[in-house]
Amino acid sequence: MSTSSDGPRPLRTAESARETIETESVATVRRGPFRGMRERWNELSRPAQWAWMLIPVAIAYALPFLNFFPLTTAPGNDWPLALFAMAVYALVAVGLNVVVGYAGLLDLGYVAFFAVGSYTAAMFTSPDSPYLKIPYLWTLPLAMVVAMIFGITLGVPTLRLRGDYLAIVTLGFGEIVRILATIIPAMKGQVGFQNVGRPPGEGPNGIPLFANSNGTPWYWLTVTILIIILLLAGNLERSRVGRAWIAIREDEDAAETMGVPTFRYKVWAFAIGASVGGLSGALFAGQVGFVNNQKFDVQTSILFLAAVVLGGTGNKVGAILGGAIVAYIPLRFTAIADYKYLIFGVALVILMIYRSKGLIPAKMRLMAYSRKALEWVAPPKTPASPPPRPTPSTEGGAS
């Protein structure tokens, strides 16, 4: 009587683990609408990525000349001025994304920093203000500094709170700033400040280059500033500070247990986000040329947050796209003013149903990093021929 055995099952090797990780990673990528695009982009060298990025940058600068149906907002709104509004909202969304997307802090009063930047530009350039007059371009860094001070002032006493409690406090802070602009005589309430300053320069016909009705120079200036802020935000995201923010966003208690000074990094997030909001407000005040307390309500703050969520929380490119869409849709349908916000609401609902994590959601790269680490520890080997299977053993000869 002969018996047979298949032998012991081989243990899982590094090669099989690597294949499993790669299979899971590819399956995850293929579930998205852009099959493999993110992987192909990450495989490119840094110079190649910069070269490809020149194409959307060139298109962005050429947008004022692409004034055709169905893209244009005419006749309801001037197309270059609409582009400027979209660029300002995109800049605001990038700043708010630092607070909400990177650090995970729900801020419903971000419009307060936008208002601080606008009033800073108005009070130091408008002839209606009794204060010292300085060139408009100097007010841009000044607005960032003043808004950063306000961000630290708000963050130090309130960032011990979390979640809904922090959202309520920031919402109240936004209303406090608007009410102060109403009751403080120097801020002129509803009367406001007229003839806010603008950058220097005149056209061939003697008309100021940065006139309130000429949106193209204002749009180009804002896009240039937006690109600079994007570069800084990208470097910050990849730095030690950015990794600390992501740790706080995922689990604040775990991050603090591992030695991350969570309170300090949250204050930094508020300060940096506030500075970008102040810069956006100064640009807005310069183009509009008029600032009063009616431009900084709760609805505007909610739109800022909607831009970040719509674009993709934690993704700076998604924040730009979300901010541009939130500004564009109401301006596109101004000709049918009775229905423009109905269309706006329906569009947001549809987008969020089909893209619940935003148009360009942020994806963790831990799987890619673990695969690279595994390849470094156990480099791939050429597959060897499998060992011969054991033959059936017999005892005492054949029966």
Image (spheres, grey):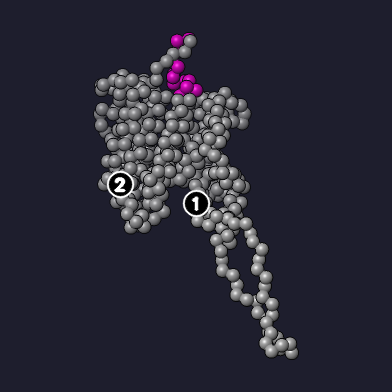
Determine the residue located farthest toward the top in the rendered image.
205
Q: Gap in Å between the C-alphas at discs 2 and 1?
A: 28 Å
Residue carrying label 2: 264
The relative height of residue 365 versus residue 320 in the rendered view (above or below) is: below
Q: Quadrant of the N terminus?
A: bottom right
Along the line of sight, the residue nearer the viewer: 118 or 209? 209
Q: Position of residue 298 (x, y in %)?
A: 39, 40
Q: Position of residue 227 (x, y in %)?
A: 46, 32
Q: Is residue 209 magenta?
A: yes
Horizontal arrangement in the rendering, residue 326 relative to residue 293 (left or right) = right
Q: Earlier in the sequence, mark 2 or mark 1?
A: 2
User: Which class describes the residues within 10 Å of circle 1: few (<14), some (14-19), or many (20+)?
Assistant: few
Along the line of sight, the residue nearer the viewer: 44 or 242? 44
Where is residue 292, by image quadrant? Answer: top left
Q: What type is the residue that disc 2 sits on?
A: Arg
Q: Residue at x 37, y 49 (%)?
A: 244
Q: Do labels 2 and 1 touch, CB within 8 Å?
A: no
Q: Residue at x 67, y 87 (%)?
A: 395
Q: What type is the residue that disc 1 sits on?
A: Tyr
Where is residue 389, by image quadrant? Answer: bottom right
The relative height of residue 191 versus residue 239 in the rendered view (above or below) is: above
Q: Residue at x 59, y 44 (%)?
A: 40
Residue carrying label 1: 369
> Is any atom of residue 367 visible in this view?
no
Query: Foreground mark, 2 or 1?
Result: 1
Magenta residues, start to end: 205-218
